[in-house]
Image (cartoon, grey):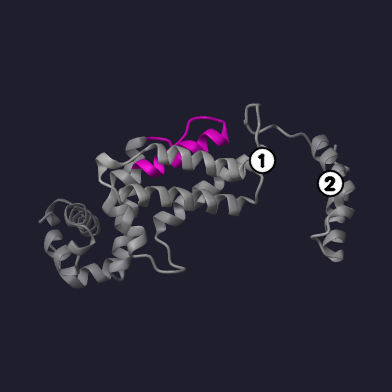
Amino acid sequence: MIRETMPTKEAIICATARLLEQGGRDAVSTRAVAAAAGVQVPTIYRQFGDMRGLLDAVVSYVLDRYLAQKGPVTTVDDPVVALREQWDCNVNFGLGYPAFYTLLYSDYQPGMPFRATVETITFLEGLMREVAKAGRLRVEVNQATQMLHAACSGVILTLLGRAPEERDMTLSVATREATLDAVLVPSEAPTKTPNIQPAQVANRAIALKALLPDATALTTSERQLLDEWLDRLSVLT
């Protein structure tokens, strides 16, 4: 029982985390959590709404502690390097905390992802936007984000399906690079986000406007609207 040493909500989260780590999802029931935390079962529902709410809070708690101990995900200005570091961070968390990571998928409800999943994807999307600003993204930001997240999750679950001594960690690197190749524009130059001046924006708007008549994927009204926007951008100085 750990109730005496910490607030009720934290005691419940820590007790649940310990049960998950020791016995997996099957070890976590409201009665087991209540006994381990030194509270009554109704207290769990008052604090978290239901078991799903409790598990959601537990995974976020463990992930936050992992990230706090690890420090900043990246300290570099290169957004492509940052993507690689984020991938490796996710893989290390998944393999280091298997009971918590697999929970994200074994207790998955369509349209209701765990908060930790949403926060991870949001952070990844932010990195992808920086890559796009650097002119390195060949597909739309959301598509690139989903591709990288899906590939990384698949690698983690695949590796977790093998005994630790049988895991081939080159799978992670190979899949990471193959996915990045699919979403990135090749470049020999550093990918630090450029400081784009208004005149450069105007030049690119003029170039795009010149190509607009060939944009057969757009309707007439869409081309007219984009043409108006490009006219405004083309006069920036």
Instruction: Report which residue position mark 2 lands on.
Output: 208
Instruction: Report which residue position mark 1 lands on.
Output: 133
Q: Nearer the viewer, residue 68 or 8?
A: 68
Residue 61's spot in the image, x, y percent?
A: 31, 51
Task: Say which quadrant the N terminus sits in.
Answer: bottom left
Q: Dividing the picture into quarters, in which one does residue 131 lie?
A: top right
Give, as a three-letter code, the residue at label 2.
Leu
Task: Say which quadrant the C terminus sits in.
Answer: top right
Q: Which of 182 and 57 is in front in this view?
A: 182
Placement of 225 over or under 149, stated as above or below: below
Placement of 12 over or under 131, stated as above or below: below
Placement of 81 over or under 140, stated as above or below: above
Q: Is residue 82 one of those drawn in magenta?
A: yes
Q: Is mark 2 on a helix, strand or loop?
A: helix
Question: In the shown orientation, is residue 107 left or right of residue 84?
Answer: left
Q: What stretch is highlighted in magenta?
A: 71-92
Question: In the shown orientation, is residue 24 left or right of residue 155?
Answer: left
Placement of 83 over or under 48, stated as above or below: above
User: Mark 2 or mark 1: which comes first in sequence?
Assistant: 1
Residue 196's spot in the image, x, y percent?
A: 73, 34
Q: Dividing the picture into quarters, in which one does residue 179 lie?
A: top right
Q: Is residue 2 one of those drawn in magenta?
A: no
Q: Among all residues in the image, which is located at the extreme top?
A: 189
Question: In the shown orientation, is residue 46 left or right of residue 216?
Answer: left
Q: Crowding at label 2, few (<14), some or many (≥20) Cα neighbours within 10 Å?
A: some
The residue shown at (37%, 48%) is 156
Instruction: Measure the alpha-carbon separation of dots 2 and 1.
Output: 16 Å
**Secondary structure character of the magenta stretch overall:** helix
Give, as a three-letter code, the residue at label 1.
Lys
Residue 88's spot in the image, x, y percent?
A: 42, 39
Q: Mark 2 or mark 1, which is nearer to you?
A: 2
Q: What element carries label 1?
A: helix
